[in-house]
């Protein structure tokens, strides 16, 4: 089998199976289907249990989002490697008269996409994965920042409690 015949989708399925065989637990999606939530503007107004519920909710979404991101990054690495290999192999077929003796990578990529329709689905999948990766990375940051803000509120309450006991 030639390297250019390796399909990233098939390889990704095999890799997911190998990882599943390790038996490592994965976080499930937290309960609740609201696509948006309202973060309290005054965390000091939250009761202790409600504060804990918010913290666990964001920790759960952080863990689940990290799970999704790790799967996506694994697939993206394979798709990108297959895409790069196929684009690089297209360089061999380019006419030096039409594209110059040493065309830039962007020129090679554009020519490969224009000449080889079989690359289009791979190119589209790569773009989708790159876009979703950015969205997931943004969500991770949101969940991390919200959890940290609630954690600071919890620490503030604990400090106030200690001061009240000594004062």
Image (tube, grey):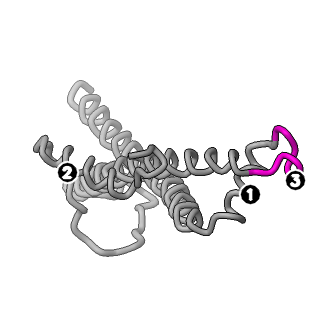
Q: Is residue 166 magenta?
A: no
Relative to 156, residue 20 above or below: below
- Assess disc 1: are there few (<14), some (14-19) or many (≥20) residues with their C-alpha within 10 Å of its C-alpha: few
Indicate which disc, 2 or 1, sits on the residue closer to the N terminus.
Answer: 2
Q: What span is in magenta? A: 94-102
Q: Nearer the viewer, residue 98 or 62?
A: 98
Using a 10 Å C-alpha cutoff, classify the residue at mark 3 as few (fewer than 14 neighbours), some (14 to 19) or many (20 or more).
few
- Tell me residue 71's x, y (percent): 34, 51
Q: Quadrant of residue 24?
A: top left
As for residue 95 lying within the magenta part, the answer is yes
Q: Secondary structure at mark 2?
A: helix
Can you give x and y, in whole percent of width and height, for residue 52 in the image? 23, 52
Instruction: Find disc 1 in the rendering and name its residue.
Output: 110
- Cα distance in 3D space between marks 3 and 1: 13 Å
Depth check: give the residue in front, 23 or 85. Answer: 85
Please report contact status of discs 3 and 1: CB closer than 8 Å, yes or no: no
Q: Tell me residue 44's x, y (percent).
A: 36, 52
Q: Which mark lies nearer to you, 3 or 2?
A: 3
Residue sitting at x 51%, y 63%: 125
Q: Earlier in the sequence, mark 3 or mark 1?
A: 3
Please name whichever residue, 24 or 159, is drawn nearer the observer in this view of the structure. 24
36 horizontally vs 134: left or right:
left
Q: Nearer the viewer, mark 3 or mark 1?
A: 3
Q: Residue furthest bottom?
A: 34
Residue 111 left/right relative to 2: right
**Circle 2 residue:** 17
| Residue at horizontal 68 percent and vertical 57 percent from the top | 112
* Residue at x-position 89% and y-position 49%: 97
């Amino acid at each position: 089998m030639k390297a250019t015949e390796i399909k990233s989708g098939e390889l990704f399925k095999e890799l997911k199976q190998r990882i599943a065989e390790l038996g490592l637990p994965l976080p499930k999606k937290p309960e609740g289907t609201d696509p948006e939530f309202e973060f309290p503007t005054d965390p000091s107004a939250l009761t202790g249990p409600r504060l804990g519920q918010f913290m666990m909710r964001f920790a759960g979404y952080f863990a689940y989002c990290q799970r999704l991101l790790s799967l996506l990054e694994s697939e993206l690495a394979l798709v990108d490697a297959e895409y790069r290999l196929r684009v690089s192999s297209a360089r061999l077929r380019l006419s030096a008269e039409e594209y110059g003796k040493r065309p830039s990578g962007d020129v090679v990529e554009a020519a490969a996409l224009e000449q080889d329709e079989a690359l289009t689905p791979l190119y589209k999948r790569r773009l989708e994965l790159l876009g979703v990766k950015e969205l997931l990375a943004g969500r991770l940051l949101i969940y991390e920042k919200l959890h940290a803000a609630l954690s600071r509120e919890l620490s503030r309450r604990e400090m106030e409690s200690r001061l009240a006991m000594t004062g």
